[in-house]
Amino acid sequence: MPELRQNFFTKEWVIIATERAKRPEELATHRPAQTVPSFVESCPFCPGNENKTPPEIMRYPANGNGNSNAPWTVRVIPNKFAALSRETQPTRSLQDVWRRIEGFGFHEVIIDSPDHAACMALLRDEQVGDILRAYKERYSLLSMDRRINHVTIFKNHGADAGASLAHPHSQLIATPVIPSQVRHRLHEALRHYDDDGTCMFCHMVEREVEEQTRIVQKSEHFVAMEVFASATPFATHIFPLRHMASFGDISAAEIADLARVLRSLLAKIYVGLENPDLNFTIRSGPSDYASARHFHWYVSVIPRLTRVAGFELGSGMFINTVLPEAAAEFLRGVKVEKAVGA
Ligand SMILES: [Zn+2]
Ligand SMILES: [Zn+2]
């Protein structure tokens, strides 16, 4: 029988449609494997083309001369087609029912690797660690800007996930407002804290680790799991085991550990589901939440295996055709050590 499940931390309801249940492997893309070259001369993110991007913000290893051709592992640049502009101020206005803010904000691109073919699932753990370190450095710096209220870090992998450039990269958008979906999660977390006196995420993670059925993998500092009311097949969340409201609080040891867990999860999805398009995003509390007791940041990895249709648009409610427990079991079983050079 189908079942309605409620997400513990978003309070959103999901229909788990076992009637139409698919075996996890039926969702694999079965895409013919294509060979992507490591270097593309016309690609603005490939080495040697540093002067084709807007002036560089930072790189690893650090180098005083922006946009130079010296070897690098990660580069951060402003998005050439930025959604928001750093050249204006977040001036607010309200006229009758029309509220506006000048389009102030930061939109940056993190180039994951000099290698055009190296999607994150195939990178070495140390390289993923460098990318996460760049995320943290930019997150922490932009969070200090008093005009910024929220920073979203995300990756679009594949055309169906919104990637317009093939060279592996991530993005960051810092906005002068807290998006309403984020605000909703913060409200629910605060309500839980007021009622129970605990962080709802710490509470849920503790119970899920005991229960085990939805756990994909657990490391020293993180756990990757399907949530009980997963909205889409194989949507997997990675939670820090230590209570932390802001991604900016992650330590160096935790970055190294998260790099292993994230890379391994992406590799399991890459191998098991045959390189589906996917998004991941770091959901952190707003900049001022560093010491908040009620919120807890996490990474959400969403393979784009199904399309959002009318029911989802009309209700905000999703129909998931894969049992979260089956998805977790499937991902646990995918062996990646041989497929990917760790
Ligand atoms: Zn490239
Ligand atoms: Zn917590």
Image (cartoon, rainbow, N blue to C red):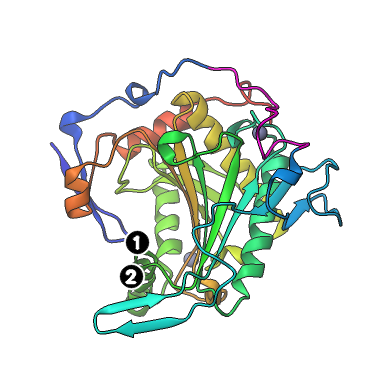
- 126 with respect to 250 (left or right): right
Q: Quadrant of residue 72?
A: top right
- Marker count (numbered): 2
Magenta span: predominant SS is loop
Quadrant, the C terminus: top right
What residue would you read off at disc 1?
9
User: What's the residue at 70%, 27% (across, down)?
Assistant: 39
Closer-to-camera residue (301/32): 32
Name the spot of residue 252 as percent of width and height, x first: 72, 57
Which disc, if any, is residue 175? none
* Secondary structure category for the residue under label 1: loop
- 239 with respect to 192 (left or right): right
Name the spot of residue 129 as percent of width and height, x first: 69, 47
Name the spot of residue 224 as percent of width and height, x first: 49, 45
What residue would you read off at disc 2?
188
CB under 8 Å between callouts 1 and 2?
yes
Q: Is residue 91 above or below residue 20?
A: below
User: What's the residue at 47%, 15% (across, down)?
Assistant: 32
Q: Which residues are magenta?
A: 34-48
Q: Assess whether residue 52 is covered by the magenta stretch.
A: no
List the single residue furthest toward the top. Answer: 32
In primary-sequence order, the first of circles 1 and 2 is: 1
Mark 2 lies within 8 Å of ligand 2 (Cβ measured):
no
Q: Is residue 19 above or below residue 170?
A: above
